[in-house]
Amino acid sequence: MKSALVFLTATVLFGSCQSGTATNSEKITNTDTNSVRDTQTLSNADSIDFKHLHLDVSVSFERKEISGQAVWAISNRGAAKDLRLDSYALSVDSVYVDGKKGSFSFGPSVPYLGQQLRIPILPATKEVSVYYASSDSATALQWLSPTQTLTKKHPFLYTQSESVYARSWVPCPDGPGIRFTYDARVTVPKGLMALMSAENPQKVSDSGIYHFRMENPIPAYLLALAVGDIQFRAIDSRTGVYAEPAMIDRARWELADVGKMVTTAEGLYGPYRWGRYDVLILPPGFPIGGMENPRLTFATPTIIAGDRSLVNLIAHELAHNWSGNLVTNATWNDIWMNEGFTVYFERRITEAMLGRTYVDMLWELGFQDLEEQVTELGKDSRDTWLKGAVDGRDPDLSLSDIPYEKGSLFLELIEQAVGREKFDPFLKEYFAAHAFKSITTEQFLDYLNQHLIKGDSTLASKIRINEWVYGPGIPSNAPRADSVRFVKVNAARAEFLAGATPASLATTEWTTNEWLQFLRKMPKELTVAQMAMLDKQFQFTQSGNSEIADLWFIMAVNRHYSVAYPAMEKFLSSVGRQKFLEPLYGAMMASGQQRLAAEIYSKYRQNYHPLTQVKLDKLVRK
């Protein structure tokens, strides 16, 4: 495996349609060959193989700094005159080339990408060491004071390296198509535990020194570190959960079925190839639902609902250990190769564990999310293609609902067209054939053509691949789930709107999905009196389910249901997930309650991740 390639030669399927909207005519031939370059790494991994990273770093909460040594084992196969690494707001003290002190320089600052670190080397150079320190501008790092944690006794640090943020705490070749192994020695304040996306301890080290090893090659965005007052609980022999002491028992109960999820996933698409699978429940400031760091998923505490109703998120992060970690998108323009596959796989895991009627609800809610995203971006927008176009732009723009929901629907369409008896073996072999490699959209389409479509023009015309991958919006042949359970939900909502009391509605067996459908489709004309009736019966304002609570608070803001505002403020003080924060603050801004938004945000801004702060600063202070 050539783990260090940035230039990826791809045999392009249907290449003639890449530059514009697809035609309806599917050509099952290889028509073009392109070299695809990841423009969002400033490294020269096109000429240098980055084989292994050794980290020896210390974590200082006083200085809010990670500092130490990054040692790169390389092969200068292109006889490059210098080593070029990605960096973002890093300070470099010195460098050594094969043990001898060398020189270095920084290139100009590039928007979103930072600066290129240049180190002169020789054709025979094997090892380059960089002594460096992170800064308070590190986009990957959130430093939490003791008061921002559950225990209130110790500080906490965690990283979020996706998409291009690893370069803000490690000088590295930071692109998803560049893979390397690593080991690390990390020194932290005594009494705290350190964890990484690697083999991990289960007890606190008396010395404050921890050693880590990742033997499978990974891209830089999967480098991860967490340091804090953390405890471990086993789930079974190969799965477990980490969390702060005040959270650990609740987390262990909530995630009791994680071991079963791993076994279920293996039954679908082959063995789990990373050793252990553990989950770290982070403090509230974590900006996303979960991050699929190998061996150790980082997860939001918002999934700890007390009734196991939101742990489907773990199925998603687990699935990433096949689609994403094992087979990785080559560039951020190919992100649907990670996320679309993962949503599809997640729903197959969920279906196997909870049944088809349950997963049909997930498909329908996802379709609604996709429709809303397409409306927001514009039905003809280039940003609604599966094949992305974020070169020269913020790579996080690729992380919309398009790669997730449109990507998963594309795979569901293929499954329906060929049948599971063919599609499941195809996917299983796909993961095996590309294990620990990175892949472009075009390489996947070529593989799809060779191993599944096999020249069947009738099948290709039925799927309309070009329209999905290189065309905008939602194609007209998109599958849509026939959710029998939502039929009943919609009937119950209609009864309420026709005058039935909330107590008379048949809601006893409803899951989170039914409640979301019930509330999502409420009319804008819903009155404060009707809101109060629903709240009295179902206690939405006091809900411990973050998905339901966030949607309810948005409804409350839009209808000026001020009874919910104290609970909404408490929610905003204890949740850092952007999925919840942006729509809720956005609703306040759009409904003429800018002052309320500004007052609440000023109180709790420090609780949110730096990347979340950047987005909310623009939203709330515009």
Image (cartoon, rainbow, N blue to C red):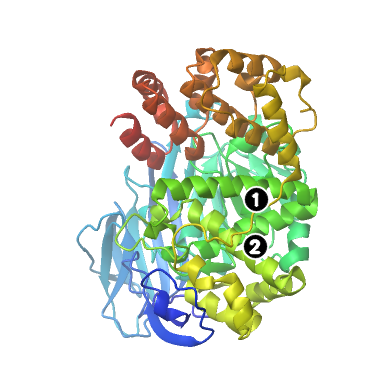
* Foreground pick, 211 / 317: 317
Mark 2 belongs to which amino acid?
Glu
Residue 18, how many percent across, how many down? 40, 74
- In the rendered structure, find residue 257 and report the number of the disc placed on it: none
Relative to 475, residue 306 above or below:
above
- 1 and 2 marks in contact (CB < 8 Å): yes
Residue 155, how many percent across, how many down? 49, 33
* Foreground pick, 509 / 578: 509
Q: Is residue 200 visible?
A: no
Which residue is identified by label 2? 412
Mark toward the start of the polypeptide (1 vs 2): 1
Which residue is identified by label 1? 363
Which image quarter: residue 326?
Answer: bottom right
Give me the residue at 38% from left, 20% from top.
Answer: 593
Residue 313, how many percent across, how many down? 64, 46
User: Which residue ends up furthest to the front in the rendered image?
Assistant: 498
Relative to 89, residue 42 above or below:
below
